[in-house]
Amino acid sequence: PSPNYDVNISPSDENSNSHTINYAMSIWYVDEISTLDGKVTIDMNLELRWQDKRLHFINLHEEKTKINCQEIWLPDVYAVAGYGGGRQYNRNVYQERCFAEKFKNVTNELHEEDPMMAVESHGKVYLWYVTSFNVEVPCHFNLRMYPFGTQECHVTFINRDNWRMISMAPLEIGPDVVDDLLEYQLTDVGQKVIERNNHQYVVLTLSLRTLYDYHILNSFIPSALMFIICYTSFFFPITDFNERIMVSLTALLVLAALFTQISETSVKTPYFKLIDIWYVSIIGLCFSVVVLIAMINGLRPKKNVKEALIQLNPIRNGIGPLIVEVDLATNKDMSKILNTLSEIVLFGLFILLIAV
């Protein structure tokens, strides 16, 4: 570089091509993603190519020639969380290399001032900055359908010098990138350039699908079984009120304990998630069973058959006790009707809850 060359100042050529950065991305590894942490760590490689006509090179190889990164101006690219903007996060760079590459129309001339007669290249010479790094950014998930549904995690790369960003190669996915990322399955990885407020950003998008098998086995099936146990109390004899109410109350308490455990271990959101709605609904159905059993017991006749009421009168004048028979059974047993109706309605609501 010339004595007037400053690595802190970007090239100021008026030619628009000089303000273009070609980029290529490679994903080497994606760490496991958990909903509770809500973060993703990506190990990747970023290649940047541009021109700086303030520089002249001698003795360039036919292939790329390695140069010192400290001696040239480098594009300042940083990562932010989100789509097109957000909080800035540092890149943990563990390897960086710089190269100079002759373009096809480069002409070579002997450097006459050099006693060694070095070859000086004129014309288009590309500069390359190849960096390997990992970056950890939060993913802004919409968890209304949790633990089902799909999610997208965005990482935006911004060029602080506001140069045009043009992709020069498709996104490369390394062999170590696995699909199963703990709670999510990686279904697709994409990149695209977006423009906002006269600035261009490169957005890297991870498309994810929730792996819900764990939640089905540990949340939905146990809670559904507890409601079924609670629901079976309708099939106990109506006269066994104590057994009916104890079974339904026990199931209700277990459901409340499961809901508390899930609420403490899952991610906190300002809105209800699908799993929260499921537990609130299933607890509401079980509570309805308890209330209906109490109502059925209140409607049950005190006596189901004729009972003799014996009025004991003192034996006077040889007259024995007076026996009066009273029929306390009603013409229509409302408790049985309500019990049957409750079986049908609650079973239908339970099936509707599962279907929805």
Image (cartoon, rainbow, N blue to C red):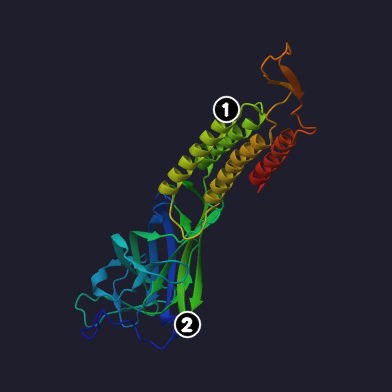
Location of residue 10 with respect to 328 vertically, above or below: below
C-alpha gap between disc 1 and disc 2: 72 Å
Position of 51 with respect to 7 (left or right) is: right
Q: Residue 347 falls in which quadrant of the image? A: top right
- Residue carrying label 1: 243
Q: Secondary structure at mark 1?
A: helix
**Which residue is the site of mark 2?**
198
The structure residue drawn at horizontal position 38% and vertical position 61%, both measured from the top left corner, is 137
Residues at badges 1 and 2 in contact (C-beta under 8 Å)?
no
Q: Quadrant of residue 94?
A: bottom left
Looking at the picture, tell me which residue is in the foreground, 56 or 150. 150
Please determine whether, in this image, residue 23 is positioned above or below residue 322: below
Nearer the observer, 85 or 4: 85
The 10 Å Cα crowd at callout 2, few under 14, some 14 to 19, many 20 or more, is few
Mark 1 or mark 2: which comes first in sequence? 2
Badge 2 marks a residue whose secondary structure is loop
Q: How many marks?
A: 2
The three-letter code of the residue at mark 2 reads Asn
